[in-house]
Amino acid sequence: MKKYNFNAGPSILPREVIENTAKQILDFNGSGLSLMEISHRAKDFQPVVDEAVELIKELLDIPQGYSVIFLGGGASLQFMQIPANFLIKKAAYVNSGTWAKKAMKEAKHFGEVVEVASSAEDGYTYYPEFEGKVPADADYCHICTNNTIFGTELRRDPDVPVPLIADMSSDIMSRPVDVSKYTAIYAGCQKNMAMAGVTMIIVKDDMLGKAPRELPTMIDYRTHVEKGSMFNTPPVVPIYSLLETMRWLKKNGGVEAADKRAHERAEALYAEIDRNKLFRGTVQEGSRSIMNLCFVMNDEYKDLEKPFLDFATERGMVGIKGHRSVGGFRASCYNAQTMEGVNALIKCMQDFEKQH
Ligand SMILES: *Cc1c(COP(=O)(O)O)cnc(C)c1O
């Protein structure tokens, strides 16, 4: 049976990305060696990193003066690496969800953290308003643009009076971004860019080296900028899969087209969530994510949660169970998600409704 992958991360990738990466794993560029066996310093691998960086710069239209680096450690390592490099005295954080809160926790190791806005008391069901609330003397303002667990999204580049830093792990490459508004953007790449194992960071070069502390070599972004992500062994296979995903994205119209497709998918699925008598959305008007679509059973049908999950699983739906901290359902519709997949889920919801 055909499977439809709605996993929140690691998540769906284009079939051709997986096939091309698999080929290189068996025989890298006709070398007779596997991509898993070559040195990251092999002459054939440098072009992989170079092309990946170039494509990211092209796709996001990154201005001069920014570097793109690849590291391990996930977005979670960035929760500490960002403040280590940028927090001088005080940083402003928007508490918009679980990941944003984790980022705040790590920043507290390095200085004062001001929570400028929060939707925690309302169960993170909306994206809190924060633009007018950022103190002008903060070293930076940190936001998480898409809250993967709760399904809320900002989906625009806000205006704040201080340097802006964003965790874009779950909506990167799904829309055009005005990178010039940011000092740093980071993303664990396993949602929308690659297989798991690589983290991408875009940093504004002239903002580096200002932190008033001795940074361990690996934590200092300058190390990785200067060495072109080759200070130590980078995650070779994940970076290759990232390159293939960026090639696929470019071939398919770049981030503008990805944005349009994401809107089409989300509109169709939200329309069904709103129409179907069994379900309702969990996110307030204006904050609905078009990457992670969260919904629950209506109160009078609460007992049908498990039966619907079983029903959908039997029909090939994978990964629609909501995050363990939230419950209900979550359909993640990243760049590689198809309208066919979304329509299959909609059909599932309609067929299940007819039985009740
Ligand atoms: C998945 C996710 C993370 C955590 O990423 P890791 O790479 O597992 O550390 C952080 N932030 C957001 C928004 C995420 O979606």
Image (cartoon, rainbow, N blue to C red):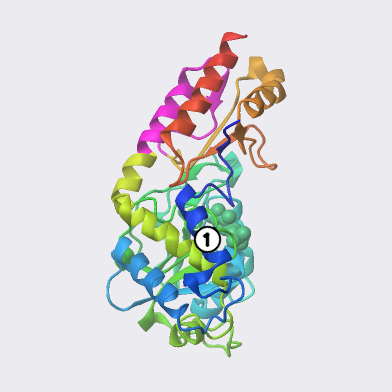
Identify whether 327 is placed above or below 203. above
Question: Can you tell which quarter of the image residue 290 is in?
Answer: top left
Question: Can you tell which quarter of the image residue 318 is in?
Answer: top right
Of residues 341 and 263, the one drawn nearer to the viewer in this rendering: 341
Magenta span has 264? Answer: yes
Residue 105 placement (x, y as % from top left):
64, 64
Q: Which residues are magenta?
A: 263-286
Identify whether 323 is placed above or below 104. above
Looking at the rendered structure, the kind of residue marked 1 is Lys
- Residue named by callout 1: 23
Of residues 265 and 295, the one drawn nearer to the viewer in this rendering: 265
Residue 257 placement (x, y as % from top left):
30, 46
Tell me: 292 left or right of 310. left
Could you tell me which residue is drawn at 52 percent across and 48 percent down? 147
Could you tell me which residue is drawn at 61 percent across and 75 percent down? 37
Magenta span has 144? Answer: no
Residue 9 placement (x, y as % from top left):
58, 50
Residue placed farthest to the bottom in the image?
214
Ligand 1 - quadrant of the structure image: bottom right
The quarter of the picture where the C terminus appears is top right
Could you tell me which residue is drawn at 60 percent across and 40 percent down? 123
The quarter of the picture where the N terminus appears is top right
Look at the image and tell me whether residue 157 can be seen. no
